[in-house]
Amino acid sequence: MENSVFTISNLNLHYGTFQALNNINIDIEKNKVTALIGPSGCGKSTFLRCLNRMNDQNDKCKISGNVLYHSEDVYQKNYDVISLRTKVGMVFQKPNPFPMTIFDNVAYGPRCQGLKNKNQLYKIVESSLKKAALWEEVKDRLKESAMGLSGGQQQRLCIARAIAMEPEVILMDEPTSALDPIATLKIEELINDLKKNYAIVIVTHSMQQAARISDNTAFFLSGELIEYNQTDVVFTAPKESKTEDYITGRFG
Amino acid sequence: MTNRTQFDYELEELKLSLIKMGDLVIKNIHLSLKSFIEMNSDLANKIIKDDKIVNQFEYDIEKDCMRIILKEQPVARDLRLITSVLKMITDLERIGDHAADISKLTVFMEKNNKPYLVPQVNKMVDESEKMIKMALESFVNQDQNIALKVIDNDDIVDDYFTEIQHLVAEAIRQDNIDADYAIYLMMAAKYLERIGDHAVNIAEWVIFSIVGHHRN
């Protein structure tokens, strides 16, 4: 597909003898929100982690097939994983700010990349926090600990931290499941705003959230990609009966 | 299998309400034509009054649909089913209005000494009733074939209308029909023809609820 950032073909993943992903073929488009839905253990988070090689730490994990990021296989030998992870950021279920100041959290990535110029760092921190819709709430306490922020603010800080690396893709694994409805709404509005500049892939257990915020929806079941289509098609007239059974809550 | 017992129960109740509304509407059409043919103003007035019950059905079902949407946040076939019900009740309510319209003609006519009865009107009403019944049956059984048959049957109703038009025109030329009666008869026939169209609309919404796209 012309607008694809990721093209995944024939992707299989085993944890030891257990096959967690079975022949996945999917394209991730830029400037779109792609939602991954499915019951627990269906492989959606495993799939998400394949996109920036977060499964590498697991010795039992064996992968075959292609995960092409801009036509280059991220699993090829000598592929620069560090560079991949700057381009493909990740936000987790539970907000995980580092135990340091708000400023240092956002500046962490650029500093690791060797940036020392204070002015430049400040500019990156400011623009990242603005893009994450957190700036107005924290601009007067950048030197305070990030641990003092609310859950919703911490999650937006984590998004700012990802944005500071100027990524192209942001992966989100249930980013609002630990947040209250207001904080959830803020993150959802932020996602809608962020897709102007980034491709977003989000794992969510909330059908309503997937329907609200995503452009494309992929339904996973038992390690297989059952259906991948435009979100309005999936939630009004899905092609597969398994998808329909799952999203209407008559599943098992 | 995960159950959504309460949700499924509410969807069944919704279908049941729609059937009840449909039955009442069919009864009203039938009696409205009877009142017209027999020039029975009492019966006609009763139907005009009963139209309020049809309207109440529409209001109640609409409220139920909104409550279910709010509570259950339906998607896919459930969403299509509820959307279809919301659209179908509008057509059923219109059919009810036309039954009341025909009854109003009866009241206007008072005692006309020279009724000009044509069998095609009875056939039209039979066919329209059949179409509504089939449309509702296709909905309850989610049977696309029956719905498609309803759409085809509209031609029969339209043909009867054309026949009546020719018969009345000829009767006018022959001076066999009272001028007022001719107008009222044609109006009644037109209402019946519109009822057929509404039955088609219902059938089209049934197809939407089954396959997910609206028939053009």
Image: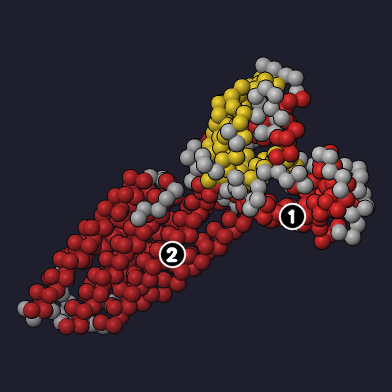
On screen, residue A186 versus residue B149, left or right, reads right
**Do the dots labelled 1 and 2 sit on one chain?**
no
On screen, residue A194 versus residue A66, left or right, reads right
On screen, residue A49 versus residue B118, left or right, reads right
The answer to which of A63 and A239 lies nearer the viewer is A63
Which residue lies under the disc numbered 2? B90
Badge 2 sits on which subunit? B
- Residue at position x 41%, y 71% from top? B51
Badge 1 sits on which subunit? A
Quick one: quadrant of the C terminus of chain B? bottom left
Label 2 amino acid?
Thr
Outermost residue toward the right in this view: A144
Label 1 – label 2 distance at C-alpha = 47 Å
- Residue at position x 86%, y 48% from top? A117
Q: Are marks 1 and 2 in contact (CB under 8 Å)?
A: no
- Residue at position x 51%, y 61% from top? B61
The answer to which of A17 and B16 lies nearer the viewer is A17
Quick one: quadrant of the N terminus of chain B? top right
Q: Horizontal and vertical percent for residue B83? A: 49, 56
The answer to which of A194 and B141 lies nearer the viewer is A194
- Residue at position x 51%, y 66% from top? B59
Tag in front: 1 or 2: 1
Label 1 amino acid?
Lys
Q: Secondary structure at mark 1?
A: helix
Quadrant assignment, res B124: bottom left
Which residue lies under the disc numbered 1? A131
